[in-house]
Amino acid sequence: MANESPSLPERIPYHLAVIMDGNGRWARERGLPRQAGHRAGSENLRRVLRACGEFGIKILTIYAFSTENWGRPEDEVRGLISIVENVIDRELKHLHANGVQLRHLGELEGLSPELQQKVRNAVELTRNNDHLTLNIAFNYGGRQDLIQAFRRIVQAGIPPDQINETLIDYYLYTTGQPDPDLVVRTAGEMRLSNFLLWQASYAEYYATPVYWPDFDREELLKAILHFNRRERRFGLVPQP
Ligand code: IPE
Ligand code: IPE
Ligand code: MG
């Protein structure tokens, strides 16, 4: 499908990470409860996934619920968690049929046993799919990721002189995956909010004022075009 559109940019990020922000503001502007914004946001996922497939993006990481989001009002937290559960229930068959491999970035601990089981089942069912990998960062914190990695490194008795970037990569939630090339944040904020702290160290960053429920194929294309105009230097001098 990627070849059908003549207007596709030359370079497509292999790994795209998205901070899906602005559901609350989207709802408020419509006089709706915040939960309606979260629902609209979850419905937008299918559209963005389809566009990622069309553009040839191989890994999509979405930030769905942070370790800090537990501090929101109880009913909003409950609503957000039930949306994740509904997305798994509603979309799993469709994702699997479309060759999507699902991975969870974050801790299962702290979630209900039913949801833990649903996440495990979804990951297990789709583990051999290779069209596109969808990482759902849920009950996720970038600092928590580093903490759990360091704990397991110590538990494994790894001597200090063997600790290097490759080893730390291996112990992170994203084990086996290349770092994101592009991090997109919707709804305008210019911060990472504890997302992919280690992995995004050389990612390009793109922020758009568009709220997540309105972020569609055209908006994604803009982000990729922007990525194409960037010169990635990785600490070196400009290319002649
Ligand atoms: C993003 O939308 C969804 C989550 C953080 C879970 P928000 O709920 O943060 O929306 P705003 O930032 O209040 O508009
Ligand atoms: C970041 O959005 C977390 C997710 C998108 C899941 P937040 O809305 O929670 O971040 P802050 O509070 O603006 O930093
Ligand atoms: Mg927000």
Image (cartoon, helix red, strand yellow):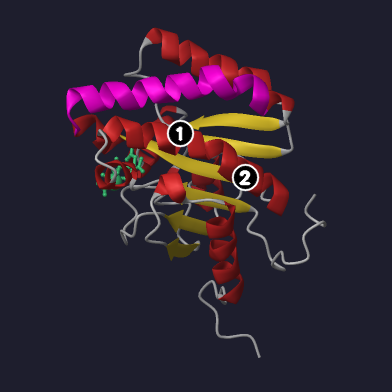
Q: Which residues are magenta?
A: 72-95
Q: Position of residue 170 (x, y in %)?
A: 55, 40
Q: Residue at x 34, y 42 (%)?
A: 23
Of the pair 117 and 54, the residue shown nearer to us: 54
In terms of secondary structure, where does tag 2 sit? strand
* Residue lying at 49% horizontally and 34% vertically, measured from the top left: 43
How crowded pointer 2 is (Cα within 10 Å; few <14, some 14-19, many 20+) is rated as many
Judged by its main secondary structure, the magenta piece is helix
Q: Is residue 73 magenta?
A: yes
Quarter where residue 10 is shown: bottom right
- Point out the quarter of the image occupied by ligand 2: top left
The residue beneath circle 2 is 59
Residue 226 is tagged as none
Dot 1 amino acid type? Ser
Residue 67 inside the magenta-drawn segment: no
Quadrant where the C terminus is found in the figure = bottom right
Residue 46 lies left or right of residue 198; in this view the side is right
Q: Can residue 208 be seen in the rendering of this structure? A: yes
Residue wearing tag 1: 42
Position in image of residue 198 (x %, y %): 43, 51
Vertical relation: 128 (above or below) 125: below
Compare marks 1 and 2 and give the one earlier in the sequence: 1
For the residues marked 1 and 2, what is the alpha-carbon distance in whole angstroms?
18 Å
- To which quarter of the image does residue 101 belong? top right
Foreground: disc 1 or disc 2: 1
